[in-house]
Image: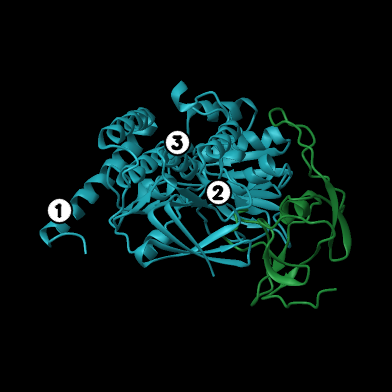
Amino acid sequence: MRKIETDIAIIGAGSAGLCAAIQAAAAGAGVVVFDENQLPGGQLFKQIHKFFGSREHQAGVRGFEIGQQLLEDVKKSGAKVMLDSVVYGLFAENSLGVIAEDKYHYEVKAKKIILAAGAKENYMAFPGSTLPGVMGAGAAQTMINVNRVLPGKRIVMLGSGNVGLIVSYQLLQAGAQVAAVVEAAPTIGGYGVHAGKIRRAGVPILTSHTIKEVYGKEEVEGVVLAQLDEKWQMIPGTEQDIQADTLCLAVGLNPMTELAWMAGCQFTHIPALGGHVPLHDHNMETTKPGIYVAGDITGVEEASSAMEEGKLAGIAAAAALGCLSQEEAAAKKQEVLRRLDMLRTGLFGEKRKAAKEQQMADMAGWQALTAEKGGVK
Amino acid sequence: MSLSGERRIQEHPILPEVARKQVTIYYDGQAISAYEGEPIAAALMSAGLRSFRRTVKKGEPRGIFCAIGRCTDCMMIVNGKPNIRTCVTPVEDGMRVSRQLGYGKAEEAK
């Protein structure tokens, strides 16, 4: 067993984790980032579309270009990044169990821990849903944009949120056909600008429709759709059979919270954020002192907000270690919070903002209850 | 079925070209052209192969679902070792890959 001692251990080298590392290392803290993947950058390198927001949110810059910049910044910051390193457990006294390169076992002791594990795609069951050719929309996006391989030739997309719309357009860019985007709700879920792009390319977006079944012997050969009534029930006789070799599921994501559960963090359930999220305060600190969270683990949003939350956690953890004065930390945090607030505006942002406020209210409730009982045990 | 890499994206309106080292892997003995370091699953998919294993009880086919190492639906036998997540395991020259039946059985390394 090898041992590592560090000021701050960060789990996840994606948007949130890398931004946390850059801030904390710049403040002078010793930082080690662990990621189970072979390459850093999380999901940024498959995002080839231009980001939204204002210039200070890097609007107009493509996701993979932001990823490249982050990698350069983290290199300069002095933070250490350990790849191919699975954090399999979070134990008492901020101790982590890590298996690196499938053979080296590490015990990591850290004064502060930042969990930035991200999220994973939701699954949906229907007849034929386990056939090869049914895959997550994110999986298809990885195949085309990172690996440069088409997962199929003719694709049906289930879900018209931003992931479904953006990946549909990127599948077209990669040279695949998109037969249809299917949406159970009566209206399109994502931004109009993304929906417009695929409509102009001739792809139908079928609202109030769902997948009845997927058929095929060894792989997907076709998809049967059906229309839904106002009670979300399939209307008999409305079935249509679409020839396709691939069905992508863009039906949401859920936070990867395993380590936070293991650490004994308190949770709240907020459907708009993707399910159970660890309670945390304005410093991104959970109910377990010294354990922070950032990015999709705190509720599924987008890379822009994950980066800001990562900065917040990095600043807060470094300040708690005395690397930043209270005034310096407060000024930096205020800047980040202002940018986060800007990201959570508009029709779509307001919903996420309300969900985040709900989380803060639940955290305040827990804090009040704990104070009554005489503090954190 | 062609094993010629017909599903490789040759031209892309946004992504720049990348220089990658071409190697060969073997799927049930058949040679497949692959790039060093890409996930095994991507190399197989480029040749049109998508059915990676069969389930324990019913022998149903399974393939890629999440492509980020979470769901384990893409496990195959690689160089004699079963239960390898092909979506996150990088290609090395000369790798032997075969479809996994049920829990898979370790083979003697050849």
For marks 2 and 1, the one nearer the N-term is 2
Mark 3, secondary structure of its residue: loop
Quick one: A252 or A323, which is closer to the camera? A323
Dot 3 corresponds to which residue?
A187
The chain painted cyan is: A
Which of the chains bears the disc numbered 3? A
Reply above or below: A308 against B36.
above
Please name the residue shown 59% across and 27% down the image.
A197
Residue type indicated by callout 1: Ala
Residue A240: % across, % down:
62, 47
Residue A198: % across, % down:
60, 30
Dot 2 corresponds to which residue?
A81
For marks 3 and 1, the one nearer the N-term is 3
2 vs 3, front mark? 2
Dot 1 corresponds to which residue?
A368
Please name the residue shown 50% across and 48% down the image.
A251
